[in-house]
Amino acid sequence: MRITNNMLINNIMTHLSSNLNRTMKYQNQLATGKKISMPSDDPIVASRALKLRTDVAEIQQYSRNMDDALSWMAITEATMNQINDVLQRFREITVQAANGTNTPDDLQKIGAEAQELITQVIQLANTSYAGRYIFSGFKTDKPLLKSDGTFNVDVAKDEFIQFEIGIGDRINVNVPGSDLFNRANDAAEDGDCLLISTLVNIKKAINGEELDPGENQHEKISNLLGELDLEIENLLRVRAGLGARMNRVELTSNRLDDDYVNFTKLMSLNEDVDMAEAIMNLFNEQNVYQASLSTTARVIQPSLVDYLK
């Protein structure tokens, strides 16, 4: 087969282009720090990179969900702690009022404090987080109680707001007001709230209101202490359940932190280039390219046209 100058030149240009492309490949790797710049560079690495990036993105989203869940639970726990303080103080003044040595003036002062404590409980029941009322179940745009202590919304005891903190893993972040303020009975709109009713009844007994003929005021106050203790026990039950869920979220958060580190490491191993290896390959390809240029200059001989000039 007769070899022409055009055939020789085309073949040389093809090899020079190939050598230059390999040189550019390693230059790009050093510039970007990544093994590939497009899927066609290495389809297997690209496919694995997409999967790992998806996994990391999911972990980040679940972490954000847990941060929001923990914030909601933290404000709920803080609010219930304040309610507990109020109820404990209410119990103290109730025990004090049951003492037969109190004068009518003393009972009046205790009754005034009891009313302030009731108002405080109503305000705490309407606590909001990020514009959402935390005890109103699914109706987070409405406060739980009216100013008179009756329910403002109809809240079922199982109205749980759930956050997804993992694949197929959901957790309740809220405490329905019916569970905390109505002893796990569904709360009907415009209905009486058991907790507030208990406090109001004690306050009325302290003030000497609604006493039956011949009924002893101090005995009635003492008898109502049992109802108040039931409310305090119910509060402790709800707090224990919330605390258990908070512990679970924190454990899951720690696991996700570990998963994020591991998946990020795998993603780095899959995508990131070995700089030392890339530099060595670049130098090798540069040497090959320079040698190709030098060889080309020697191989291409003067043509007949050069002699005719």
Image (cartoon, rainbow, N blue to C red):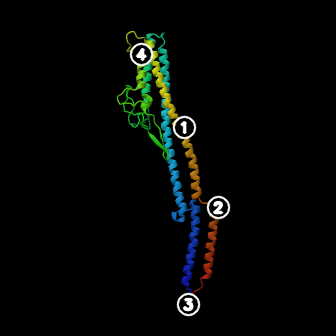
Quadrant in the picture for the N terminus: bottom right
Q: Earlier in the sequence, mark 3 or mark 4?
A: 4
**Mark 1 and mark 3: Cα distance apart in space:** 92 Å
Mark seen at residue 308: 3
Q: Up-down: is 263 above or below 158?
A: below
Mark 3 crowd level (few <14, some 14–19, many ≥20, 10 Å Cα): few
Q: Position of residue 239 (x, y in %)?
A: 50, 31
Q: Quick check: marks 3 and 4 in contact, CB under 8 Å?
A: no
Mark seen at residue 102: none
Mark 3: amino acid:
Leu
Q: Earlier in the sequence, mark 2 or mark 4?
A: 4
Quickly name the residue at label 2: 276
Quickly name the residue at label 4: 205
Mark 2 crowd level (few <14, some 14–19, many ≥20, 10 Å Cα): few
Mark 4 crowd level (few <14, some 14–19, many ≥20, 10 Å Cα): many
Mark 1 crowd level (few <14, some 14–19, many ≥20, 10 Å Cα): few
Residue mark closest to the camera, 3 vs 2: 2
Q: Up-down: is 141 above or below 45?
A: above
Mark 2: amino acid:
Ala
**Mark 2 and mark 1: Cα distance apart in space:** 45 Å
Quickly name the residue at label 1: 247
Q: Position of residue 172 (x, y in %)?
A: 47, 38
Residue mark closest to the camera, 1 vs 3: 1
Q: Quick check: marks 2 and 1 in contact, CB under 8 Å?
A: no
Tell me the SS state at disc 4.
Answer: helix
